[in-house]
Image (cartoon, rainbow, N blue to C red):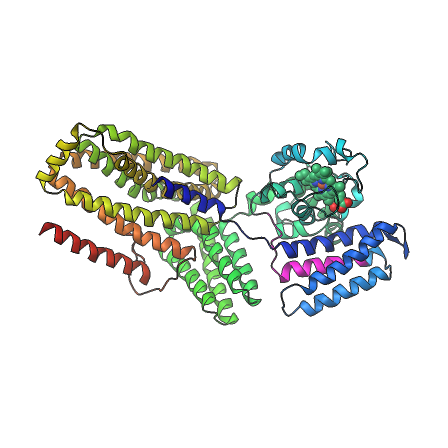
Amino acid sequence: MKKIIFYLMFAVSLYSQAINANSQQLLQLIDYLGVDYAGAVEQGRVINEAEYKEMLDFSAGIHQQLAALPDNEVKDELLMQGAKLSQWVRDKKPAQQIKSLTDTLHSTIISVYNITVTPYAQPELKQAALLYKQHCASCHGVTGEGNGAAALGMDPPPINFHDINRYQQRTLYGLFSTITQGVAGTGMTAFTELTDKQRWSLAFYVGSLAVKNDIKPNDVNHHPLADMTILTTITPAQAKAQYGEQGEQVMTFLRSHPDALFTDKTSPIEFTKQKLRDSFTAYQKQKNDLAYQLAVSAYLDGYELIEKNIGALDKQLMFDIEAAMTDLRNKIRSTASIDSVDNQITTINKKLDVAAALLTSKSLSKEATFAGAFFILLREGLEALLIVAALVAFLVKTKRLDGLRYIHFGWVSALIVGILTWWASVSLFNISGASREITEGIAAIVATVVLLYVGFWMHDKTSAAKWKSFIDDNMHKALSSGTLWTLSGLSFIAVYREAFETILFYQALWVQTGPDGQAMVFSGFITAAAVLVVVGWLIMRYSVRLPLRQFFAVTGWLMFILAIIFAGKGIAALQEAGVLMSYPVNFFRVDLLGIYPNLQGLLLQFVLIVLALFLLRKKSN
Ligand code: HEC
């Protein structure tokens, strides 16, 4: 059992996105050529021989790497531009001309090959300042002027981040790539030991040292630059050229306050739409796997977080959107026509708009927030509570009070680990919605197996005589440690499965309401917790009063029913994560009972029921 728990934790932490290192390196080369060329050639003459040689090298490298890109309809065009770039460098064309060509190449590659150019998590500049002192100050200097102790005599010297001309020419994504990949042949190594989020935080930090702007310009959040993809891929000089003084101000402000972008823009609905757009773009380029992944992410990392809030307002709409998203995934899987995928996304978007309007008009009401907070906990907590209460009742009934601490250890540590997992997911790794569902699905399936086992074991003892002898036998010796750890593990899995997700739902609810609503979130939470405590107490009180035989029959059946519910939920979670196919069938759906209208889940539940009835019959004969 302990091993399984460890595996679950690892499954969560190891699941991370693969980076397309090759294209990142290509982009870095292009970026460098654009920025450094001005230091090599002036007015048609070479002013720095070594630098110019490097530029020739770079342009040849770019051409070569362009040729190695996967084929698609714009590749020929890209190759032509690459050839042109080499030619222009040989012709010592003006720096401005080179820069505009590299900028075009850069942005075309990013959009055509769907390269991720934005941080997944909000960059933290305070954390970055500490990391900077620790890892970078020795070369780049404490204040970033390139004059650290280790910089003496270093060739090439570390960059001075206060160099305003260089700052004007650098994109945040360019800085991020340099920190990620390093610069071959210089003191600047790849900082692969830092997480993605830490490297992004550092990019924002060093990218805002030259110019600081702490005064929030008007209308920041409606400015075109208030878009992560644009903010990270254009330079301050371009921002000024395209959006004037205001653009320059917005850019300097956002570089030192990335949080301004994250708080106002993480509406899960917007996020969902963005992912759907990305998914469609990928599908158009025949990158079906990527399109599928993005469609899964649209659902799990966006929509699912507010699904319950929508459900509280309009249940049918909630199911409609979910079904439409499933259809989309099935279409992508079965390589439907581009038009039909496009139509499907339009359908989803329309429904999402309805949901968004509903949420802004209604969800801010105190009642809805309260109801949301109340039902989230009640729903997520009820199954866990049933299991823990039944286990406690079992020990009380069999007079094995010494085993209680194992049960308590199980659920308390599940709460702690759940909180840690949530914390890790938002601050350390990017645990995607898909890996969250995989963890949940595996936990549910494991719980199914253990519950079945425990259920049969209890049922097996329904003859009072058997129990009497079991209790008498065990009264004076400790329960075996295997049994105790099974109980502990079951109590852990039952709670862990729900804890992490409950926190995520609360987080989503929290960002959607104002200060008034947040008081309602608390009230909803506390009321639901109180209801759970009362239900738990009732179960224990009345179940313990049952005669032995009935007690074991009832708890045995309870475990068994929960096992079937978990089986359905586990399958559904794995389907949502996209690791299991889903064949929709015409059947009703009851979330609470783990009944979902798909063939795999229903079939498994059916098999379990038949198996159980068969075994129980055999036992009672
Ligand atoms: C051992 C010395 C050294 C350390 C430590 C170091 N750097 Fe550098 N860094 C350099 C050198 C040298 C360059 C210039 C490379 C070149 O000329 O292309 C550079 C370049 C850069 C650039 C490119 C800037 C631009 O405008 O192109 C960035 C960004 C950067 N470093 C960030 C960092 C960060 C962040 C850290 C700490 C995590 C760090 N560096 C640690 C030596 C170092």
Asked if residue 109 is among those painted magenta in the image, a careful observer would answer yes
Q: Quadrant of the N terminus?
A: top left
- Residue 323 left/right relative to 401: right
Indicate the position of residue 10 as horizontal and vertical percent values.
Answer: 45, 44
Does residue 57 appear to the left or right of 552 in the view shown?
Answer: right
Residue 486 location, quadrant:
top left
Q: Which residues are magenta?
A: 98-119
- Image-quadrant location for residue 114: bottom right
The answer to whether residue 269 is left or right of residue 32 is left
Residue depicted at x 64% and y 56%: 22
User: Which residue shows up at 75% across the image and 65% down it?
Assistant: 81
Residue 259 is situated, as x and y percent measured from the top left of the image, at 59, 41
Please count the marks in the image: 0
Image vertical order of residue 214 relative to residue 173, above or below: above
Main SS of the magenta part reads: helix
Residue at x 74%, y 35% (from the top left corner)? 139
Give the percent coordinates (x, y) of residue 195. 58, 42
In this view, the residue in front, 296 or 457, is: 457
Question: In front: 127, or 612?
Answer: 612
Vertical arrangement, residue 384 with respect to residue 294, above or below:
above
**Would you say residue 278 is visible in this rendering?**
yes
Q: Quadrant of residue 415?
A: top left
Q: Is residue 202 magenta?
A: no
